[in-house]
Amino acid sequence: MTTRRCVCPGSFDPVTLGHLDILRRAAALYDEVVVAVLHNPAKQGTFPVERRLALVREALGEELRATVRVEAYADRLLVDVCREVGAQAVVKGLRGGTDFAYELPMALMNRHLSGVETLFLPGDPGLEHVSSSLVREVHRYGGDVSALVPGGVLAALRELE
Ligand code: PNS
């Protein structure tokens, strides 16, 4: 029987509880999930890519680690990553209409390029305001993001101070 595999792509700079909610739900729908941390080596980002991977892996917990793997891909089209890992679909979370407007052209382009489908999961309404960039900014200026990120990410954010 074919292994049903999906890719959850993103920058994960850093992973948030919103991401983790989607990863957990993707893992319940597919046999295997590949978390693809896509990055451009010319762009620094806040956390080095190896740290982003480690923070996602740590946050997954033992149960999810059996079926969810976390890999980095530099300067690659998402459709090529999907082909390489043998994924039938991309799974992404939507926090609202703004996310949909951003994601729809990418989903259509990816289907145009390779036929890969994109599944959108509605994000947890309690985490609708959570994004990596807002988490970084709020933390930088002293706001409390402890309810929005895994413990390891909170520690990593504190190391940036
Ligand atoms: O977490 P982000 O920044 O919203 O993730 C965006 C990401 C990395 C998923 C998107 O930019 C992407 O798929 N990049 C890979 C390059 C690619 O395939 N670009 C064409 C998309 S149609």
Image (spheres, rainbow, N blue to C red):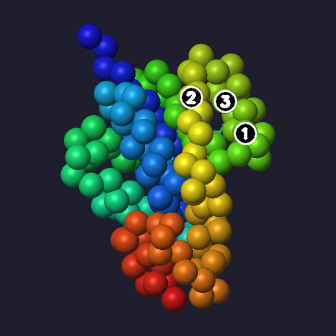
Can residue 101 be seen from the camera position used here? yes
The residue depicted at 60 percent of the width and 83 percent of the height is 143
Disc 1 residue: CB within 8 Å of ligand 1:
no
The residue at which mark 3 appears reads as: 107
Report, in whole angstroms, how far the alpha carbon at label 3 lies from the one at label 1: 10 Å
Q: Amino acid at mark 3?
A: Ala
- Quarter where residue 94 is shown: top right
Q: Earlier in the sequence, mark 2 or mark 1?
A: 1
Is the CB atom of the residue marked by disc 3 within 8 angstroms of ligand 1's nearest atom? yes
Q: Amino acid at mark 2?
A: Leu
Asked which quadrant contains residue 78, the reply is top right
Apparent side of residue 144 relative to residue 111 in the rendered image (left or right) = left
Q: Residues within 10 Å of mark 2 (few under 14, many from 20)?
A: some
Q: Regarding mark 2 in the picture, which secondary structure is present there?
A: strand
Determine the secondary structure under disc 1.
helix
Query: Residue, x 36% and y 36% (percent of image)?
Result: 27
Give the CA separation, mark 2 to mark 1: 12 Å
Q: Label 3 near label 2: C-beta < 8 Å?
A: no
Residue 106 vertical position relative to residue 124 in the rendered view, above or below: above
- Of mark 3 and mark 1, the one earlier in the sequence is 1
Question: Which numbered marker is on residue 100?
Answer: 1
Q: Is residue 56 above or below residue 118?
A: below
Which residue matches tag 2? 119
